[in-house]
Amino acid sequence: MNVRLYVLQRGTALIMAPLVLVHIAIIFYATSRGLSAADILGRTRGSFGWAAYYSLFVLAAATHGAIGLRVIASEWTALRGRQLDALMWIFGLALAVLGLRAVAAVVLP
Amino acid sequence: MTNTIEVSLWRGKADGRYQTFSVPQRENQTVLDVVTWVQRNADPTLSYRFACRVGMCGSCAMTVNGRPRWTCRTHTSKVVENGRLEIGPLANLPVIKDLTCDMQAFFEKWQKAKGVFAPSKTKNDPIEKILPGSPPRQAADAAIECINCAVCFAACDTVRWNEDYVGPAALNRAWTLVNDVRDAGNRDRLSAVAAGGGCHACHSHQSCQEHCPKALNPTASIAGLKRRTMQAYIRREL
Amino acid sequence: MRPHTTSHRRDALWLAFLVHRISGLALACFLPLHFLALGLAIRGEATLDGFLKWTANPLVKLAETGLVFLLAVHMLGGMRVLVIENMPWRDGQKRFATGALAFAIIAAAVFLVRAA
């Protein structure tokens, strides 16, 4: 890890700390009433606030996770150099695409 | 009848094996004394390294019962378990023979992290006054007593898992120089420790602090480098 | 085999590192599945509801408890690292690491009790 990846990884960690707290609060709130699609979608559909919250969360998590995975692969597997970069980009982009698709699925009316 | 210690010593290179000796236990005996006893009384071909015997030179570190230690300041009374002692060369460095390992990689990484003083003045300039209480001097003081024994290097799993990582001792030294107001090499030094294998490879396991015989805290020094390089990166100085 | 240094792997702070790494890895594996499940809503409310019915299964509740623990322990452990790296040094990191673990266990336990 160099300073650029470090700043991105720790920066996204800092962004996510409050987002995770809110997320855990929502998990507790939502599951206490039993999960239902009507509940979830009633909260999120057409809401700009939730769209922004979840989009930021997805992008931060994809960046943070991809860099973290690169570090783990560099220490615990035989992957080196470009292979590590490829793993990071493929995982990060896949997570971002899947995540933003999920956000679109729950916020678009 | 005197008590004896069953001492297993590593023999040969990386593919060697442990050989066991019975060594008389004495009062105030150090692990280095035990190794020396074996060489003088049982097997003169035993190879090991030491110089000062008083914890200054940093040459006698070995793995003692699974833990890297400075053997000249480690009493057997503290480390013998069930009458047994297992002594091997330091981990994370190639074994040359028996208890000696090749320190080249350790010192090359020291150079790579720019752990070398870069003077800003000549001998014709007056000596710079450094106030003992000034914050940079205090920060340098906290990290300066390193004796290059490589105990931290052997205890660090990030060193073990990341062949590029320069390791705690080299970064700890770089941090003392970052705080040395007489030094002129900080631009190069910060670039060196901000690259891959530099301070950002550290995961703060704190094994270096846990094992340092001089009770230094390389993790804190590395955290200082992380802050300093991050500031420089954000200001586009790197 | 040449001798290895193993003593450090019994240290609380080394274990804290391991918990942080494994929880991060597990969350990275879980996230794509999480996103795929929520993506079901694209095919309408009924598709998502069909999946959510499945999550009422007690075994799934147990797995969700595990996820709450992973998320909490990774966040709290990560905060500890951020504090080490960006604030003046504080001794007693073992206490902070143990505290992070304890809080995560409590959060997961509360989740399990409420879900049951």
Image: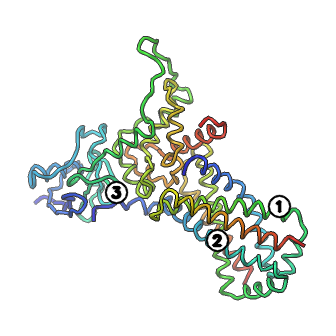
Query: Do the CB atoms of the residues marked 1 and 2 lie less than 8 Å apart?
Result: no
Query: Do the CB atoms of the residues marked 2 and 3 lie less than 8 Å apart?
Result: no
Total marks in image = 3
Q: Chain of mark 1?
A: A
Q: Quadrant of the C terminus of chain C?
A: bottom right
Q: Chain of mark 2?
A: C
Q: Is residue A27 positioned above or below A10 on the image?
A: below
User: From mark 1 to mark 3, how far is it between C-alphas?
Assistant: 51 Å
Q: Which residue is mark 3?
A: B67
In the image: residue B215, left or right of residue A92: left
User: Disc 1 vs disc 2: which is toward the camera?
Assistant: 1
State the mark number for residue C69: 2
Query: Do the CB atoms of the residues marked 1 and 3 lie less than 8 Å apart?
Result: no
Corner quadrant of residue B214? top left
Q: Which residue is mark 1?
A: A52
In the image: residue A42, left or right of residue C37: right
Q: Is residue B175 positioned above or below A62 on the image?
A: above
Q: Chain of mark 3?
A: B
Q: Does dot 1 land on a helix, a strand or a loop?
A: helix
Corner quadrant of residue A36? bottom right
User: From mark 2 to mark 3, how far is it between C-alphas?
Assistant: 33 Å
User: Disc 1 vs disc 3: which is toward the camera?
Assistant: 1
In the rendered image, residue A84, in percent from the top left (x then y), is placed at: 53, 60
Q: Respond whether the residues carrying marks 1 and 2 are from the same subunit.
A: no
Q: Amino acid at mark 3?
A: Arg
Residue at 90% over, 73% down: A109
Q: Respond whether the residues carrying marks 2 and 3 are from the same subunit.
A: no
